[in-house]
Amino acid sequence: ALGVNTSCALGLDEKVYCWGDNRRGQVGNYLNSSLEASPQVVKLNNGEDLSQVVKIQAGANHLCALTKEKDLYCWGDNAQFQLNTSIVLSSNNALLVNSGVDSFSLGANHSCVVKGGIPSCVGSNLFYQLSNGSLSPSATWELALKEVGSFSGVNALYGGDTFTIFKEGNNYFGAGVNSQGELGTGNTTPAPKSISVLSDKSPSLIVTGVASLCFTENGFGFCQGLNDNNFANPQGLG
């Protein structure tokens, strides 16, 4: 998992190891050092190692890990409340931020989870990336909404820098900035609540970037979003 200047890896021992920039606690080793040049074990707030981890992911300067027990722990920058708290500006150890989590995904400064098919998000919302119709950041989990109705069966999440993609069954919905056409709607209009995206596609793999989204379909790769030509529609990769 790669942040802006911090890297993390999931070890064979099911623990998380991080190194690099630690000025916002991104290494998670319970130390206030500004830099760690070698891998450090991520710690809980009781000083014990974070363990039994099955998935890790990085935002810009915050990171999260999901355990076998479906507990989500996060650490690092919290300037936009992406750690689900308004008490601290950052955390140098892993904080329990949610439980019963089926899946999660991170944007640059926001975090989203799915629990029982229902998605919710927390953190920065400057570009509608929380999909709740607001532009205000949130320090508590906010229910993500579609343009019409609510989600009921989300089975995957994809967090871009300032946008979020939700998969509900075989349908995809996106919310967020879209200034570079990253939602693939054919325009650059932002989406305050999730709108239908990739409606005529059946992607087998989706990867999000700062202001772009790429996917594969039938063995071919396509990308949309930030480019020299600012593509607002999916373009095949040559």
Image: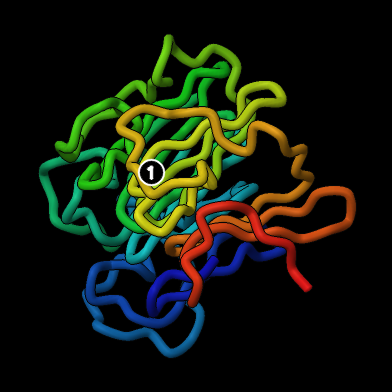
How far from the left and from the top, in percent, is residue 169? Answer: 69, 21
The image quarter containing residue 203 is top right
Q: Residue at x 47, y 66 (%)?
A: 230
Q: Check the picture and name the quadrant holding the N terminus.
A: bottom right
**What's the coloring here?**
rainbow
Foreground: 87 or 207?
A: 207
Q: Residue at x 56, y 56 (%)?
A: 213
Looking at the rendered structure, the secondary structure element under dot 1 is strand
Residue flagged by tag 1: what amino acid is it?
Answer: Ser
Q: Residue at x 62, y 63 (%)?
A: 10
Instruction: Decide if residue 178 is in sight here.
Output: yes
Q: Is residue 40 left or right of residue 141?
A: right
Q: Residue at x 57, y 41 (%)?
A: 67
- Above or below, 76 relative to 107: below
How far from the left and from the top, in percent, is residue 62? Answer: 35, 59
Residue ID for mark 1: 111
- Above or below, 172 relative to 105: above
How far from the left and from the top, in percent, is residue 99? Answer: 45, 28
Instruction: Decide if residue 74 is in sight here.
Output: no
Q: Check the picture and name the quadrant holding the C terminus.
A: bottom right
- Above or below, 107 relative to 133: below
Foreground: 53 or 175?
A: 175
Foreground: 22 or 201?
A: 201
Q: Is residue 22 left or right of residue 55?
A: left
Q: Residue farthest to the right?
A: 219
- Above or below, 194 relative to 235: above
